[in-house]
Structures are given as structure tokens and as C-alpha cells.
Image (cartoon, rainbow, N blue to C red):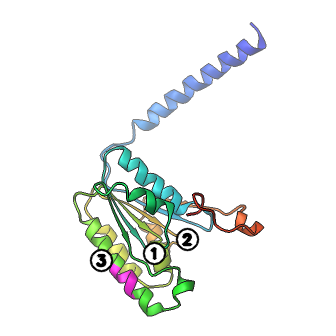
Amino acid sequence: MTDEDAKNREHAEAMKALKAEREALMATKTDDAPGLLLVHTGDGKGKSTAAFGMVARALGWNQKVGIVQYIKGKWITGERQFFKKFPDEVRYEIMGQGFTWDTQDRAKDIEAAEAAWKTSMEMLHDPALDLVLLDELNIALRYDYLDIHRVVADLQARPRDKHVVISGRNAKPELIAIADLVTEMTLVKHPFEQGIKAQRGIDF
């Protein structure tokens, strides 16, 4: 037996053992799960990107999706351009007044956030929607445009089968505590630090 044959045999045996471990683990899990609450946060790029990827995945399974964009306002993005091609499958609502450093008007930001949360509640309780994305909600919560305790209570009172994805940096501890999945994007390197502005198709 050659060294390569020995390596192949060793690999096959290891994968066989790994498969057995995996099958034993999966036997302890269930498909009968309630709607999940997923939070994408952190300083790194990719929070909304990952969330919109989940929207595309849901559409691939013929599910219907609701999207509420907080903060970003009328800024035209690639995701907005794309998902408007699916008017029967995606309800897409842009509710923000723009980035907080652009608006410079806390009262208007609070008013916009309240209107956005009202729309979010409609989607959370719409039986036609399988997944609801609340994009940049964490920013509205960070600046206390919405009461975190009310938001937590409303999320917990949503229909059992409703999946919800929330994006934005600085997720509140109260939100993290009730989430089923929390992913923190870590910034390692960013082209902006090299003097490069946001790029169409990459950043927006």
C-alpha cells in the first residue's frame, strides 16, 4: 500500500466516524421549531448583506418576505433595485429619513422610527409573510428612537411561526438576550480606510 493509499484510507475512516457523530447529534434536534429571531450586528461590513441573502434564500423556497428599512431613507441601493422586481413576493418599505448625521433632526428621526415600527408590526402579524427583515433597526434602538422594552415585548408576542432578521451595529443587550442567533461582524480591514468610497454593487 502506497502512502497515498494509506492517507485515503485514513481519511475515509475519519469521515465515517465523523458522519456517525453527526447523525447522532442530528437525532437530538427537531424540525418543529418556532419562528427564529436572528440578529446581525458588529462593526464589520456584511450585516445587511447577509440579511438580504436570507431574503433571496426565502424567495428560492417560494416564501414571502416583508422588509422595513430604517435609517437609510431614500438612498438607492442594489437590494432595493433588485427586490422591487418581486412585487408579489416582497413587501419593501423604506421608512427612514436618511443617515442620522444627514438628518440632524432627532424629532423627525423618532417620528420616522415610530412609523417604521408600526409598519413592522403589520408585517410581523401578516400571515402571508414568512420572513420579516428589519434592516438597521439596531441603529434606531441605539439612539433610543424606539423603546427597547416595547420592541422586545412586541417581538416576543409575534406569531409563533414568524422568522425575523434584525440588522445594524450596536445591538442592545435586551435584544441579544431574546435572539435565537446572534452574529457579530468583526472589522478586520476595510477599503474606506484606504481612501476608497462605497462602491456600487459592493457596498450598496
Quarter of the view holding residue 166: bottom left
Q: Which one is earlier in the sequence, the residue at label 3 or at label 2? A: 3
- Kindly report the secondary structure that dominates the magenta region of the rendered protein: helix
Q: Secondary structure at mark 2?
A: loop
- Residue 157 at x, y = what percent? 27, 69
User: Residue at point 34% right, 54% down?
Assistant: 86
Mark in front: 1 vs 2: 1
Marks 1 and 2 close (CB-CB < 8 Å): no
Magenta region: 111-115
Marks 3 and 2 close (CB-CB < 8 Å): no
- The amino acid type, in three-letter code, at marker 3 is Lys
Q: Secondary structure at mark 1?
A: loop
The label number, if any, that marks residue 118 in the structure image: 3
Q: Which one is earlier in the sequence, the residue at label 1 or at label 2? A: 1
Task: Measure the alpha-carbon separation of dots 3 and 2.
Answer: 22 Å
Tag 1 residue: 74
Q: How many marks?
A: 3
- Residue 130 at x, y = what percent? 30, 55
* Left/right of residue 33 with respect to residue 10 in the rendered view: left
Task: Measure the alpha-carbon separation of dots 1 and 2.
Answer: 20 Å
Query: Who is closer to the viewer here, 106 or 201?
Result: 201
* Left/right of residue 49 with respect to residue 70 in the rendered view: right
- The amino acid type, in three-letter code, at marker 2 is Arg
Query: Who is closer to the viewer here, 197 or 148?
Result: 197
Q: Which one is earlier in the sequence, the residue at label 3 or at label 1? A: 1
Magenta-colored stretch includes residue 112? yes
Tag 2 residue: 169
Q: Residues within 10 Å of mark 2 (few under 14, many from 20)?
A: many
Q: Is residue 11 above or below residue 62?
A: above
Q: Secondary structure at mark 3?
A: helix
Marks 3 and 1 close (CB-CB < 8 Å): no
- The amino acid type, in three-letter code, at marker 1 is Lys
